[in-house]
């Protein structure tokens, strides 16, 4: 069986997903693409040799098994509801929405339609981070007690992006909140967050911060620290560490090359891979294989709607914690 | 010139210092030792071939230039005052006292006597951590924005020790509070701390915790995370990382051997060096050389009385933060 | 412009090249495929949606710019001559032939036709090995004095393959001989080789060895050591090191994941990536981009026919050295 | 019991041994020192507070259990014979002599006297190299098939030293020949060596080389490569790797600090520890503990006279191989 996809949204991430699905994922093919910017859809359609839908309705009328929702975040909910009503299995990029009420509306529609839903927290499929989660899950490091996550982008996005991003916690740290739940296997109870504007004053003027430290407590007693920055000059720094009663597991970074040069001044290694398109290629492909297998086999998708909702709530708590200067319980939010 | 030391306190750390001073530090010699447990002093005296003083008064009557105060913490202040009055240059193990009023009494006496004072935060002299501090101080990584400190002992001390230790923050994390000030070059403004009993319920019954996460804010805007544990089964885990506008600096761990074995199951490296006596040998020796040089040259000691006092106050703030579940300002403490 | 390829030979490496060219190399497309085993060609044709040629003549009649010769080694020369006469730019998998007279016949035909020729020593395009070669070429490590190459396959091929492979030196070490020329930038003068049967006695019965050490001398004075094995249980071990008057450069291996787990028994990392399809993906893609650019721009191909010939001669010298128990000059061979 | 040593020879290595024995080795003390340069002996005697003997006869008349022979190489044999006749347990620095006939004369005297003898190939006691040897000996990597040794000094010694050194093979590579025997657990059968003058033409004018590659075959079928250089600008490079049917073991280097700095230009680590006094401290101390234990317990010393003789013969074969341009059998030498 081949799972036939319509890709909705042909921007940077959508065009990447379309190419991966059509060319590099066994058992998947793209049978249509759509974007509100017609040119974007046409470019991808031409590149892959697949039909371009004129509008969302036409896109959902294409005979297909699944959709990949890669449109702008503010449209996710309406698109998801329409796709659910059309009976499509749904892959949706994170976040579902920046508004938890809207998230709930979308999840209710998916539930009512009974279609599979997977939220694209791709980092769970990164082989290195997965090795950390596995070491917790299989008992290799005993009971997990402390998790440390470092997550630093190479450079900040444009201010225009910052302004509609929903803020650093729900735009950037949302991946790390998901990672914390994934690695610990435990829900978050409270959040303490501190933020700073260190990278660009314009980010502060836009009402956001660019550097933050967050501490989470989990139901199982684990404590998680997260530090994020919009700018690491040495590349995309993505590390997860889990410490427990039986040991420690750690994912390490990916350099541009596995090479070193030693001179009288010392040893040098190349910087880190620049950003997520390079760093997380394997995760995107493995995620598609897992989603396709779930659709084919009728088994649960790896990352549920509830998994998509929880990090958003943590992000809201982080924002409130930073604003009010105190730890915030998750139960205060919803 | 040779700096002549009387070593006061001949327990584990005192006997180590005596041997280092007498045998491995150029320009230093031990001319007397003392301990309230006579046998302890006699063992060290015999081993090194140096006189044993019958009591503190006799020890301070020995013709010497300096003392190394390695007695139990609760005696530090009185011994320091007596040594200051005797005109000796003073090296004192950390912490000066668990009571900040007592600390101030001791520092006043030292000030009045005009003698040099150095507090033994040896980790500043570890070549690896020092490289991190240097990378901040010399601008290699730009303005420092985030510091991460991981500090895990291999195994907890006896409960009897825990009971008189002053608590995990002032017994164990005090080194990390000093490291935060040292690496950032900036005073701490606020503290948020979370603690857990994960290693041994008896530690909880003794009123302490054995696992903690602490977040500090600094006057220069830097955010520091610290995570500590009384038990890391893979060895003594000591890492410091500083992240800034121009890059990142990191100290890494010391394994039992620099070797690996690769088999079908993967690559294996030995565990970490067991504990501070092995891990921090270089720091103890380098610290002595720095103190001896300061005494010889009449220059300031590297770690002042104020440097000894500040981490204690941070530790008190951490304890209050954990107890009250809120961030605590340093100005609330003193 | 798009460079249109006909892929000749659709076995493991040919089908990989076809998929890469058609799907992942900008500026390239596959316009036809051929294999003497019709089913192999049909599979690739169906997968990529490209025409299948009935025979070589038909394949070379397809309107195309270039061919990728991925047929069995014993057919390379005749296919290359036919392709040259058809005016196609030629990519040929290594080795051109196991018979140097035949190589010369092929190169003469290419020269006469004036078509571009590139020999597929893909490892030159591996970012890690390339970093080593670059460090020599740009003077980072001064004058190169010693090169060490370790090249170990995860497991031996079938005995049937060994029997027609041309022997370990020209089948396996030929890549390393090319690497030695590439990294040092200098021709080989003499070869000393030792071989052993350690992996499988059947390899010895087939007249070959499975473990070897080779020492090369270069015209520029550099000494190169190569050690090869048909079996490394911990994965595909591929390392190159260049040592010189100004330092040292080294390529390191690729693990299955960039992760570690530390327990009381020590630190563990995953084994190495299994084999060349995983390890050298980037090199295959980068090689295609370089060849396509050379064809488009009419510039010299990165790896010439002479570059394809030289390692074969070194391999012949290595075989003679092993057989006769003495160092052999390259000039003794041709 | 305490093993009482007289240290014979108070140059750089002798004064190091004297200080280690007297101050850092449990169960050992120095009861006398001697050097033909009286001032050298007096300096060490004063530093340690031990008697200085006026001549060798007086030194051997001191009531002691053992001697440490650290005199110049050309005197080792006569000193060893005198010490054997005096009934002392003998530690002798490598090499015993550059003349194998002389070595045999010394060993015969030791045998006749029935005293313990240990040759100071300290690298066997380095924890990292020992881990490699252990992985072979305990079967962790199966049957050993290939050993690679890289051994590079930071900078060449004075030409005056080169002139009396016995040549690079018996001065420098002798440690590596010992390592090859130690790690493989197997005697050497043949040697092939190539040498070059790359570091300093004056070394060539002195009749020696400064850069060499050597290949050894062992009785157990293992092949060993050794590459040595008198100059590595990035520090003292000391690596040993053993490859076998079940895996691979490797010792890695020691940097000045375990720290890294990452900037836009990449990651940097400090250079390697400068030379043997820093790099091999642990090996010297562990070697003394092993020798002292053997003397105390009447058990065999870890490194016998035969172990001292064998690398010399390998070095002679290496020299002949380089001179004659052919592999040389060990049986050709003796």
Image: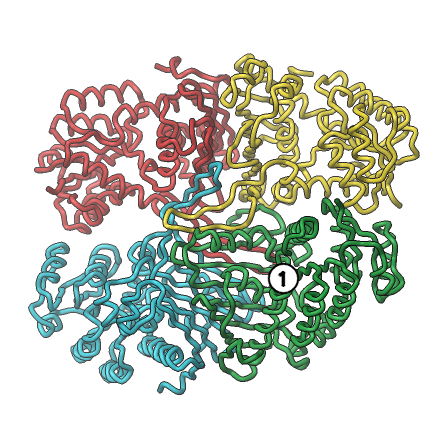
Chain colours: A yellow, B red, C green, D cyan
Q: Position of residue C21 (x, y in %)?
A: 75, 51
Dividing the picture into quadrants, the one containing residue C141 is bottom left
Question: B210 or D113: which is nearer to us?
Answer: D113
Q: Position of residue D209 (x, y in %)?
A: 33, 70
Quarter of the picture containing the C terminus of chain B is top left
- For disc 1, the chain is C
Question: C4 or B192: which is nearer to us?
Answer: C4
> Residue A218, relative to residue C167: is it above or below?
above
Quarter of the picture containing the N terminus of chain B is top left
Mark 1 neighbour density, 10 Å: few (under 14) some (14–19) many (20 or more): some
Q: Position of residue A202 (x, y in %)?
A: 55, 17
Question: What residue is drawn where x is 30% and y is 66%?
Answer: D201
Q: Judge left or right: residue B295 versus residue C306.
A: left
Question: What residue is drawn where x is 42% and y is 80%?
Answer: D325
Q: Position of residue D182 (x, y in %)?
A: 41, 70
Q: Which residue is mark 1?
A: C304
Q: Judge left or right: residue D244 versus residue B54.
A: right
Dividing the picture into quadrants, the one containing residue C305 is bottom right
> Residue A221, relative to residue C122: is it above or below?
above
Q: Is residue A121 visible?
A: yes
Element under label 1?
loop
Badge count? 1
């Amino acid at each position: 069986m081949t799972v036939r996809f319509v890709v909705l949204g042909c921007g940077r991430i959508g065009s990447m997903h379309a190419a991966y699905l059509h060319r590099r994922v066994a058992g998947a093919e793209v049978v249509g693409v759509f974007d509100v910017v017609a040119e974007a859809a046409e470019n991808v359609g031409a590149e892959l040799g697949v039909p371009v839908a004129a509008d969302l309705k036409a896109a959902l009328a294409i005979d297909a098994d699944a959709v990949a929702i890669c449109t702008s975040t503010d449209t996710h909910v309406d698109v998801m509801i329409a796709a659910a009503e059309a009976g499509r299995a749904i892959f949706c990029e994170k976040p579902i929405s920046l508004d938890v009420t809207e998230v709930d509306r979308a999840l209710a529609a998916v539930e009512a339609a009974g279609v599979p839903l997977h939220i694209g927290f791709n980092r769970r499929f990164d082989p290195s981070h997965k090795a950390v989660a596995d070491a917790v899950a299989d008992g290799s490091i005993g009971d997990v007690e402390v998790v440390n996550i470092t997550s630093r982008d190479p450079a900040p996005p444009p201010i225009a992006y910052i302004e509609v991003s929903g803020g650093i916690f729900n735009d950037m740290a949302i991946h790390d909140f998901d990672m914390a739940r994934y690695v610990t296997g435990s829900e978050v109870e409270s959040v303490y967050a501190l933020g700073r504007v260190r990278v660009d004053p314009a980010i502060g003027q836009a009402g956001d911060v660019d550097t933050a430290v967050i501490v989470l407590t989990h139901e199982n007693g684990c404590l998680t620290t997260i530090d994020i920055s919009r700018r690491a000059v040495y590349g995309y720094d993505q590390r997860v560490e889990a410490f427990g009663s039986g040991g420690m597991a750690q994912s390490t970074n990916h350099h541009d090359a596995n090479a070193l040069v030693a001179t009288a001044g010392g040893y040098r290694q190349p910087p880190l891979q620049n950003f997520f398109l390079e760093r997380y290629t394997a995760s995107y492909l493995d995620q598609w294989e897992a989603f396709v297998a779930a659709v084919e086999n009728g088994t649960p998708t790896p990352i549920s709607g509830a998994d998509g909702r929880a990090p958003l709530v943590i992000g809201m708590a982080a924002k409130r914690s930073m604003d009010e200067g105190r730890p915030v319980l998750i139960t205060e939010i919803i």
